[in-house]
Image: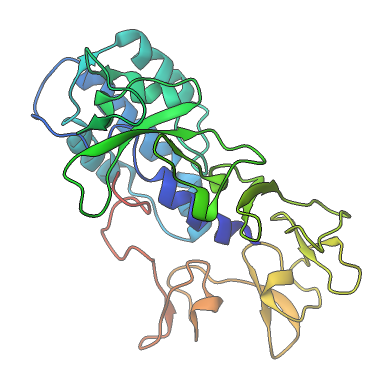
Amino acid sequence: MSFISALRVVLISCSTAVLAGACGGSGEREGSDFINAYARAWCERTTPCCDAQGVTNDVARCARTMSELLSFATGAYHADKATECLEGMKTWDCRTAAPSVCGSVFKAADPRPLGGPCKMSTDCVDSDEGRVTCAFGADDSTGTCKVKARPAAGQPCGAGATTETHMYDCTADPGLYCDYATDACKPYATLGEPCDTTECNQDSFCDDTTLRCEALTPVGGDCVDSSRCIDGGRCDDATGKCVARRAVGDPCEEPDDCASDACDTINHVCVSLTGPGAGSCLSAP
């Protein structure tokens, strides 16, 4: 599994910000300095993930949008949690969920238990297992308090990923994947390890002959398909060699030519997945 493929899945989960989905008023209020600082930190730390997608991260625009959304958070403001959250954001990896303490900066006076009804995440009780969110179904007007448990090998996934009180997501940890045959989280196999029943990590591929994880092929090396080329590379059918994918604005014939996986087939140039002026490469939280 390539890093980019894994990254797309992770971005879906981590692009939903910690305090998003709340309802209330905007404008200056207690905690507004934290909201602006958190939004800026979140947007700045997403830059490596945007770079990996071959798109530009407009930090300023992302931060403005996120600050507006987070200004709707309700509940009592906890300055100690805010300080701990911002400290954790300094080393946050955009491929993972934001520090769970960030979800406790604003909290209702009488929080609901896991499995209880809610309107926003700040209605819910904290949990040592991970960040608690107010989860809504497609047709729900009232949500349910659920904890997004920190990923670990052996946790349920696939069909069993969501229960009345928990939500599990293997992909929040780059070292894990969901084995859909068993609906359980498993660690990726590493170089030299068997891969007959386990997927290889982002630095390797499963050799069909040895059934062991082998190192990905560098640019210029022989290949039979793009899955065997280093992350960011593709297998050129004409030469049978791994070549680097192209940047936004470079010529292309198909999406696989581009680091962004997006080729304008009319003008034959690589384009950004978000399009011009879209702001952050990640979905607005």
10 vs 220: above or below: above
Q: Nearer the viewer, residue 69 or 113?
A: 113
167 vs 180: above or below: above
Q: Position of residue 46 (x, y in %)?
A: 44, 43
Q: Residue at x 44, y 21 (%)?
A: 127
Q: Nearer the viewer, residue 256 or 81?
A: 81
Q: Position of residue 212 (x, y in %)?
A: 87, 62
- Quarter of the image where one finds residue 109: top left
Instruction: Name the image quarter holding the C terminus.
Output: top left
70 vs 11: above or below: above
Q: Residue at x 44, y 45 (%)?
A: 162
228 vs 175: above or below: below
Side of 7 where 215 appears, left or right:
right
Look at the image and name its color scheme.
rainbow
Q: Residue at x 76, y 66 (%)?
A: 218
Q: Position of residue 19 (x, y in %)?
A: 29, 32
Residue, far top: 80
Side of 120 where 46 appears, left or right:
right
